[in-house]
Amino acid sequence: MNQFSTFMAEDRRLVILRVLTELPAYRTNSFLLQTLLSKWGHDPSSDQIKTDLTFLQEQGLVTNEIVESVYIATLTTRGADVAAGRITTPGVKRPGA
């Protein structure tokens, strides 16, 4: 991955966490996330969203429930801390950076 692609992936992951902090029950599905990310300047494919959600789950920032081919992501307490900039995680942009 080149430097710009890495930057975009890290920013997209931060935006996913921030979007989840704004939603009821801190939860949404991958299709709605794809739409919401476009409002933040990203235009990810459904595969990118699923890859990012898998990465975020591996880091303990979200939990994913997979129903058929739809991911349902729920923010964890650690994910909320990363979204707010209280802690950092490799692979996720720090807010304000």
Image (cartoon, helix red, strand yellow):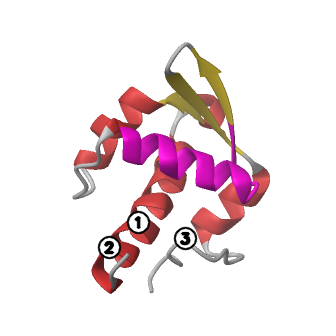
Residue, far front = 1
SS of the residue at dot 1?
helix
Residue wearing tag 3 = 92
Looking at the magenta stretch, what is its main secondary structure?
helix
Horizontally, residue 1 falls left or right of residue 29, namely left
Q: Amino acid at mark 3?
A: Val
Q: From the top left corner, tell me how far across and down residue 12 is, in percent.
A: 40, 60
51 in the magenta segment: yes
Q: CA distance from mark 3 to mark 2?
A: 13 Å
SS of the residue at dot 2?
helix
Q: Quadrant of residue 96?
A: bottom left
Q: Residues within 10 Å of mark 2 (few under 14, many from 20)?
A: few
Residue 9: mark in rendering: 1
Q: From the top left corner, tell me how far across and down residue 55 is, in percent.
A: 61, 55
Q: Which one is earlier in the sequence, the residue at label 1 or at label 3?
A: 1
Residue extent of the magenta highlight: 47-63
Residue drawn at (45%, 86%) of the image? 97
Camera-side residue: 2 or 39?
2
Horizontally, residue 33 falls left or right of residue 73, namely left
Q: Quadrant of residue 66?
A: top right
Residue 91: mark in rendering: none
Task: Determine whether label 2 and label 1 are within 8 Å by CB.
Answer: yes
Residue wearing tag 2 = 5
Q: Amino acid at mark 1?
A: Ala
